C-alpha cells in the first residue's frame, strides 16, 4: 500500500448553500463564466438564484449554456473562447457531471494556446496534461458523478467518436458548493441513473483495486449500503430532502478519492460504458446499469471470493450452505434486482443498442487503459473478445 | 447535515517513503527546523536517515530535540526562537503526536509576535487563533494521534496545569509523509495506547456527533473494525509491516476529518483525559483506555440504541434476545476486554491516580468545551458531578 493522496477542494455542503455562491466566487474573481447544461436550471429558477447571488457579491457574469450530456470538446472550445473574449477570471459550473466536466476543461483550455482536445487525448500525439487552470467552483444539481470534488473530467470528441478523460491537479475545483435542495427536481429516471453511477464508482475500486486495503473495503461497502437505502428513497420520493442529501453525500465521497486512496483502481466498467455512450446518446449511469452486472458475472468467475464478500457484507446474504461462486451469483443478482427496482435498464436492448458495433466498442474501450498486450485493465484484464462476450451477455 | 470540509494536506504513504523527505522539504524551504522528541529517532537511526535525505536535497537543518510527551508551551517557545534565530523557512516534525503538535504551533509562533500560549488559550483573554504559519511537513513515527494530516494541536501549560488545543487552517501540514516502517520499533505498550487513541478518535464522533450521518457511521465502524483486527496483530508482532501499515492508515483516517465531516462532533472522552494527563504524565492513549469504557457506560444509559448499534456492527454481538441496554453493555464489555487483551490499563489505579483531585479534573475538563450551563459538551452533556462519577467508576 504505497500511494499519494491530495484533494485541496473545499466542500460546502448543505440545503440552502446556493445562497453563498456569490460570497464564495468573489474570493476568486470579479467576472465568472457561468456554465450550464440543457435548461433545467433555467426552468427550476436555480439559474436566477445563482445569478442573483453572484450579482449581490459584485461578481459579473458571462454565460455558457447548452453543454450537452456526454459533453463535447466543441462546447469546451466555445467556453474557453468566451472566457478569453469576456475576460472571465473564475468559472462557475452549475449543473450535472457534464456541465462540471466541461467547465473544468474550459478553465484549463482558456490558459492553453493549442487545441483543447490535446488536454484530453490520452496517449495520443500532441497530448498535454493541463498544468494551469482558472479557479473553478462547482455547484452540482445532480447527485451522480462526484465531479464536484475531484480533478477529473470526461469529454467526447464528436468527430472521432472517442470519449476520453483527463485528470490533473490544476482541475481540482477551489470550492464544491453542494446544495441537496437543487437535486429535488431531478426526474425519477435520472435520479436512478445517478444512484447507479455512484455505486459503480465505488465498485470499480472495490473490484478492480489492489489486494490488502481492508479499510477502503469497509468505506466502499458503507457507501454502497447507503446508496442502496437512500437511493431507493430518493427514487420513491424526489422531494425527500434527507434522501437527496444522503445520496448527494454518497456521490461526493464515492469519487473524491477517499475510498480510492491506496487502491490503485482501474475502471473497466466505465471504459466499456464510455465506448457505448460515445456512439449512442445514453445517460452514463444507465449505461453502467447495463454493463455492470454483466461485467460482474464475468469478473466473478476468476475472483469469486471478492464477490462473495460483496454479497455478504452489502446484501447481507447468508454464507451458510453456499460456496463463494454461489454467493457471488446471489450478490450480483440482488444488485441487478435493485437496479431494475429503481428503474434502471439492465439490457442493451432496452436502450436500443444491438450487436452491430460490438467490435468497435471493444476496441474503443481498450484504447487508453490497457496493458502491454492491449487488454483493457481490470481484474482480470480483458481481451477484446472478453469485452464482446460481456456485451453479448447484456444484450 | 450542513457542514464545510477542507483538508489540503498532501499525503505520501508507504514503506520507504522517508527517503523522499529531502525532495519534499526542498519544495518548501532552504533551511528546516527539524523537531524531534525524546531520542528514540536517534537510537533507531531514523534521525540520521532524515538528515541524510534533507542534506542530499540541499536543505540545511537546525534541530529542536527533546519535545516531551504532552508537549509544553515552553518547548514551543524554544522552537519558535530557534526558527527565528536560525532563519528556518520550513518545519519538519519527526516523531509522535507530541512532536507534530509542538512543531505545528512552533511554525505559527515563529510568525506571531506575542506569547505563543495566546495561540492555544481557548476562550481566555489574549486568545488569538493563528492565521499564518511556516510550511510544516510531518513524518510520524507512531500511529496514534492522526496529527500528521490535520490542523489541530494539543499543548500543555506547565505553570497553569492546563492542557488545551488549537485548530486553524494555517496549521494543516503541507505534506504528511507516513512511512509505516518507522513505526516498527514502537514498543508494545505504546503501540497498544496508539490503537486505543485511534479507536477513541473515531468513537468521539460516532457517539458524540449529530444524528443522521449513516455514511460516516459506516466509515467509523470500518476504521474501528480494522483497528481491532490489525491493532491486535501489531501488538502481537511489532515487526509485522502489513499490520503496522494498516494501523497507521487507520490512525490517519481516524482524525483527518473524513469520518468527522458533517458529524459536528464534540470530544468529551478527550477532554476528561486531557484533564488527567495535564496533572499526571500518563500517555494520552493509556488515559483514554481508562476513561473510554467508563464514559461509554455513562453515555449508554441515555442512548442505548447507539451503543447497541456499536455492539452489533463492530463486535458482531447477536441482537437476538437482548434489548438495546443489554447489547450496549455487551459491546462496551467486549471493547474493554480488547483493551485489556492488548495491554492497556482500564483503571485509574493501574496508573497511580486516586480520587484526590477528581473535582479539579472535572473542572478542567469542562473549561473549554462547555454549554451555557458550564456542562462539558457531549451526548449527553456532563455536569462536573457526572464527570466525577465517571472517574469514580474507573478507579
Image (cartoon, coloured by chain):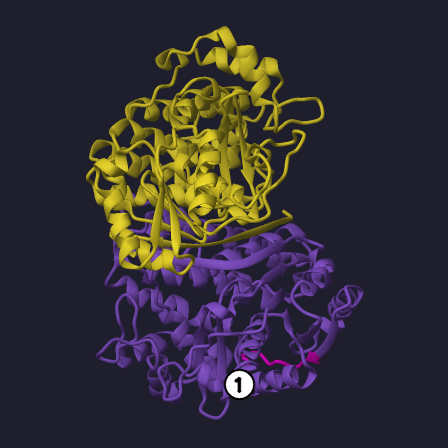
Chain colours: A yellow, B purple
How many marks overall?
Answer: 1
Task: Pick the quarter of the image with the C terminus of chain B.
Answer: bottom left
- Outermost residue to the front: A85
Tell me the residue that label 1 is attached to: B73
Q: Secondary structure at mark 1?
A: helix
Q: Is residue A313 magenta?
A: no
- x, y (%) of residue B160? 44, 91
Chain letter belonging to callout 1: B
* Residue B98 relative to residue A135: left or right: right
Q: From this viewpoint, is residue A322 visible?
A: no
Q: Quadrant of residue B391?
A: bottom left
Name above or below for residue A256 compared with residue A77: below
Residue at 39% x, 37% y is A99
Residue situated in front as seen by the camera: B239 or A185: A185
Residue situated in front as seen by the camera: B356 or A272: A272
- x, y (%) of residue A138? 39, 47
Q: Is residue B68 magenta?
A: yes
Range of residues picked out in magenta = B63-72
Task: Pick the quarter of the image with the N terminus of chain B.
Answer: bottom left
* Residue B258 relative to residue A241: left or right: right
- x, y (%) of residue B269? 39, 70
* Residue A333 relative to residue B252: left or right: left
Name above or below for residue A133 compared with residue A357: below
Residue at 48% x, 40% y is A80
Residue situated in front as seen by the camera: B342 or B69: B69
Amino acid at each position: 500500500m504505497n500511494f499519494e493522496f491530495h484533494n485541496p477542494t473545499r466542500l460546502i455542503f448543505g440545503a440552502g448553500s446556493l445562497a453563498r455562491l456569490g460570497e464564495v466566487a468573489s474570493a476568486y474573481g470579479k467576472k465568472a463564466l457561468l456554465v450550464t447544461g440543457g435548461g433545467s436550471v433555467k426552468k427550476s429558477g436555480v439559474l436566477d438564484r445563482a445569478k442573483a447571488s453572484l450579482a449581490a457579491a459584485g461578481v459579473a457574469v458571462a454565460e455558457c449554456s447548452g453543454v450537452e450530456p456526454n459533453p463535447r470538446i466543441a462546447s469546451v472550445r466555445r467556453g474557453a473562447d468566451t472566457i478569453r473574449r469576456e475576460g472571465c477570471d473564475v468559472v462557475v459550473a452549475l449543473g450535472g457531471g457534464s456541465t462540471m466536466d466541461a467547465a473544468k476543461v474550459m478553465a484549463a483550455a482558456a490558459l492553453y494556446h493549442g487545441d483543447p482536445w490535446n488536454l484530453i487525448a490520452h496517449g495520443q500525439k500532441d497530448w498535454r496534461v493541463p498544468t494551469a487552470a482558472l479557479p473553478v467552483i462547482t455547484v452540482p444539481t445532480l447527485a451522480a458523478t462526484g465531479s464536484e470534488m475531484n480533478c477529473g473530467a470526461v469529454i467526447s470528441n464528436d468527430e472521432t467518436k472517442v470519449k476520453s478523460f483527463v485528470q490533473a491537479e490544476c482541475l481540482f475545483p477551489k470550492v464544491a458548493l453542494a446544495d441537496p435542495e437543487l437535486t429535488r427536481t431531478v426526474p425519477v429516471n435520472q435520479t436512478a441513473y445517478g444512484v447507479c453511477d455512484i455505486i459503480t464508482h465505488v465498485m470499480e475500486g472495490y473490484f478492480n483495486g489492489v489486494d490488502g486495503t481492508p479499510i477502503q473495503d469497509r468505506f466502499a461497502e458503507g457507501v454502497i449500503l447507503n446508496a442502496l437505502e437512500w437511493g431507493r428513497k430518493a427514487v420513491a420520493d424526489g422531494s425527500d430532502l434527507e434522501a437527496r442529501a444522503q445520496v448527494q453525500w454518497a456521490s461526493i465521497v464515492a469519487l473524491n478519492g477517499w475510498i480510492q486512496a491506496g487502491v490503485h483502481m482501474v475502471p473497466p466498467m466505465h471504459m466499456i460504458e464510455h465506448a457505448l455512450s460515445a456512439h449512442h446518446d445514453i445517460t452514463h449511469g444507465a449505461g453502467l446499469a447495463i454493463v455492470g452486472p454483466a461485467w460482474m458475472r464475468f469478473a466473478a468467475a476468476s475472483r469469486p471470493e471478492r464477490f462473495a464478500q460483496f454479497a455478504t457484507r452489502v446484501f447481507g446474504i447468508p454464507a451458510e450452505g453456499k460456496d463463494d461462486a454461489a454467493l457471488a451469483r446471489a450478490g450480483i443478482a440482488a444488485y441487478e434486482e435493485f437496479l431494475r427496482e429503481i428503474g434502471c435498464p439492465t439490457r442493451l436492448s432496452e436502450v436500443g443498442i444491438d450487436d452491430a458495433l460490438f467490435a468497435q466498442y471493444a476496441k474503443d474501450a481498450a484504447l487508453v487503459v490497457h496493458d502491454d498486450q492491449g487488454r483493457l485493465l481490470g481484474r482480470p484484464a480483458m481481451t477484446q473478445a472478453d469485452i464482446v462476450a460481456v456485451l453479448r451477455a447484456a444484450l
